[in-house]
Every structure is written in C-alpha cells, then in structure tokens.
Image (cartoon, rainbow, N blue to C red):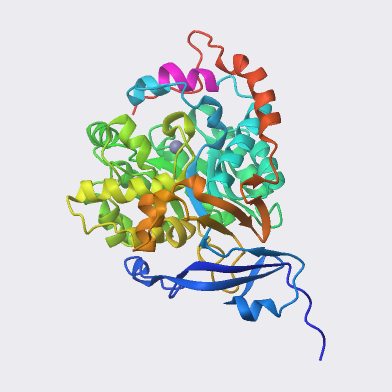
Amino acid sequence: MPAVAPADLIVTGCTALRHTDPDESDPGRGADGIHFVPDTAVVVREGVIAALTDTATAAALPAASRIDARGLVALPGLVNCHTHSPMVALRGYAEDLPEQEWFNDRIWPVESNLTPRLVALGARLACAEMIRGGVTCFADHYFAMEAVAGVVEETGLRADLGEAFFSSQGAEGRARSLDFARSHRGRAGGRITTSLAPHAPYTVDDEDLAATAALAHAHGLPVHLHAAENRAQTDTALARHGRTPVETLRRTGILDTDVLIAHGTGILERDLPALRAAEGRTAVATAPRGYLKFGWDTTPVRALVGAGVHVGLATDGAASNNTLDVWEAMALTALTQKRHEADPRWLTARQALWHATLDSARALGLGDRIGSLAPGRRADLVLVDLSGPRTQPVHDLAATLVHSARADDVRTTIVDGRVLMHDGELTTVDVPSVLGELRTLLPDLLERVPGRRIQEYDT
Ligand SMILES: [Zn+2]
C-alpha cells in the first residue's frame, strides 16, 4: 500500500461552524442547518478541504504544517459581496452628506484623478483590512481593475472583479469591461472570477444594458451592478420612465443573466415577481452601515429570500461605509432587519451567519466552491478567539459570534489553504510601506479641478 502523502496543512482542536446540507438550495432553509462541531480537525490538501475529522484522528496523519486551534472557532471565510476596494483611499473624505452632494461635490470630482498606482495602493490597504477582519473573498466593482487583479494575486485573497463603466464612456466602456472580464477570469490559480460591471441603470442606458446582457450570455459572464440603491432612485425612475429600476433590469434582459445587484433598498413589492421569475442566478448585496449613514431604509431581505433571491453581505466602499468590516455588516444586518420588519424573531444570529457565509458565496456564484467547511470545498477559513471578556460566557455560540464578537477577534485567515494572517500577523501585505506611499500620493488624488468629475449623479 502506498504511503499517504502528507497533508499540506492540518488545523486541529477548533469548534467548527458547519452547514448540515451545504448543497441545500432552498434559500429559506439554510439557516436551520447551521451547527457547531467541537474538537474538529480540518485537513487541507492542494488548497482544498480534504477531510474534516477529530483531533485524535488527525494527530496520526502526516502534515507539512499544523495549526493548534484549541479554544478557537473555525468559520468559513466571510465574503464581502460588494465593495470598491481602492476607495479606502477616500475613507472619511465625504461625511454627513446626502448622496447627491456626496457623489457630485466630493467623490466623483476626485475620482477623475485616479491612477492605476493609486488604485493598487488602495486595493492593497483594503485587502489588508479584509484579511484582518476574516474576509476571504470580495466582489469588487471599480476602475483600473488590472491593478486590483494584481493585488489579489499577490495578497492571496479570492475575488470576483468587474471593470465598471458608464454609458457616458460610449461603447468603449462596455468593451473594456468585457475585455477585462475575459482576460482575467481564472487568474491567480482560479481565485479570480470576473463579472461585467455596468455602474447602474441611472448611469448606463437601456441600450447599453441590453448589450451587456447579450455579452453576458455570449461569454458566460455574470453581471454586477448597482440598482434601486434607495427609494428616491426608484421614485425618480417611476416618475421619469414609468418603471422601477428592477423593471428596467427585466426589460433589458439583465435579470436573465446571473446578476448581483448592489443594495436594492429601493426594491418594491411590485418588483418581486420579476425577481422570482428571473432565469439566471439573482442576488442582492446588502451593506447596511452606509444606508444608516445616508438615512436610507434597508434592503428588504425577508421579501427577497421569499422570492428565491440570494442575499449576500457587503460593505460597499470605505468612502461611504468607512470600513470594509463584514463582521459589522453581519451584526448590522441582524439589527436593521429586526427594525425593518418590527420583528425580533426575524433575522436571527443563525440566519445572519448563513447570509455571511453560504448565501454570500452563492450570491457570487461560488456556492459549490466556498462558503462552507465541507470536504471538497476550497480551504477558505478563519479562526476566531472568543476567550476575551466581551465574548464570555458563551450560552449561544451563534449569538456570541454575531452580536458580541468583533472583526479583530479573528486571529488567523486562510485562503486556498494558504495562511494570509497567522495569529494576528499579516503574511502578504506590508501595511506601513503601503501607507507610506499612499500618503505621498493623496494630495494628487484630492486635487479638485472646477467642473471636472467622472460622472454626474442625476437619478
Ligand atoms: Zn457600490
């Protein structure tokens, strides 16, 4: 009998968050299946979870490296389903403003100064923040995305990347988005997937959206865009065009693609049949912190789940959200959903964990690869230390994770079996050097030329 080759990595002694049936496709039922298994060992080979066993059994297995995780909780890595990672460079730059002024007077003027170098530095800082906070995968929607792809490759994270475009760029914007998506998908050993990334129905016209839907079908690509971000956008769309933003997505064929819609706080009851009938995978990313800051209502998660829509958690960019903390998005989703529904029984801690893990993975079309600690899935996991005073004692582990733990309780972050943070130390990003260079470039970024902006916010 041939000797068993050593595992690449074995994590022993943790309590693991498991999904009873990670292939369960009924979106309403997944949260019931979340449970915790003590004394788990995770055996990793070639970037994949080869087996989940117990510590005593794992002790007999040869391994190239081991992590003793006694006292820690292992979760599937969190997924940030919608962000603009380089915007960390504008963290705190435009505060306490309504969205029109935020876009037109602050953000879109300075975004006309972006360079690939600034984008790369911002993305690197963002990746450091996300690795620290237990995020192992993010969906990014921005400009100069070749630079972000390079950063994803070097930092070891997983990402779905889309080159954003407006119709004001002409057909060239759409062509560039397609070219990026085709040339970068599968990069970084398969850690990079790509999407077409029209900005939103109010900045991309119907003809351009219809052409995007046709390209998505022709090239087997998903679509990631903003839509029905807030109620005012929906009301304006109804007044101007007699249809909601979601109805525009249906008319233009976008809903027949695999689509990820950012925000959707302006989704109405009348939109639900179209979402339910959509032919592709339909998902909405919810980023509640920004909604609270702009004074918006939140995403109607209960109605969307009822319509068969995947709901993933997100942070949006740090210029509006201030952090890329998906842990916080998980807690805020639970809290804002209770308020939205006026129902303390809706959006339990288990449901929040389910959205943060498996349903977020499904929102990106990665539900069969990540999102759950299960044999055959990629080894994307985080180890959390709940021994501190704010997380003790533990009566209900799901509640402790969602409502007591914080992102900085994450000790170790692993993607594809590679350790990107070990016991609080980042292994792939040199944060002081990133910050040093970023600071020298910030004056160029923040220079404002009167009348110059990359786009006009007029929904
Ligand atoms: Zn956004």
Quadrant housing the C terminus: top left
Residue 189, compared with residue 285, is above or below; it is below
Give above or below for 70 relative to 244: below
Where is residue 72 shown, x and y percent of the image? 53, 61
Residue beneath the point at 26% across and 39% down = 297
Residue at the right extreme of this rendering: 2
Residue found at x 61% / y 38%: 176
User: Does residue 174 appear left or right of residue 204 in this picture?
Assistant: right
Residue 221 at least partly seen: yes
Give residue 444's quadrant in the image. top right
Where's residue 96, x and y in %? 35, 22
Range of residues picked out in magenta: 104-111
Q: Quadrant of residue 458?
A: top left
Q: Quadrant of ligand 1?
A: top left
Residue farthest to the bottom, as pictured: 1
Q: Picture quarter containing residue 400?
A: bottom left
- Look at the image and say whether residue 169 sits in the magenta stretch: no
The residue at the point 41 percent across, 71 percent down is 35
**Split into 4 quadrants, where in the image is the N terminus?**
bottom right
Residue 121, compared with residue 315, is above or below; it is above
Majority secondary structure in the magenta region = helix
Q: Nearer the viewer, residue 297 or 254?
A: 297
Q: Is residue 251 visible?
A: no
Whole-percent x and y of residue 317? 48, 35
Q: Which is more toward the observer, 209 or 346?
A: 346
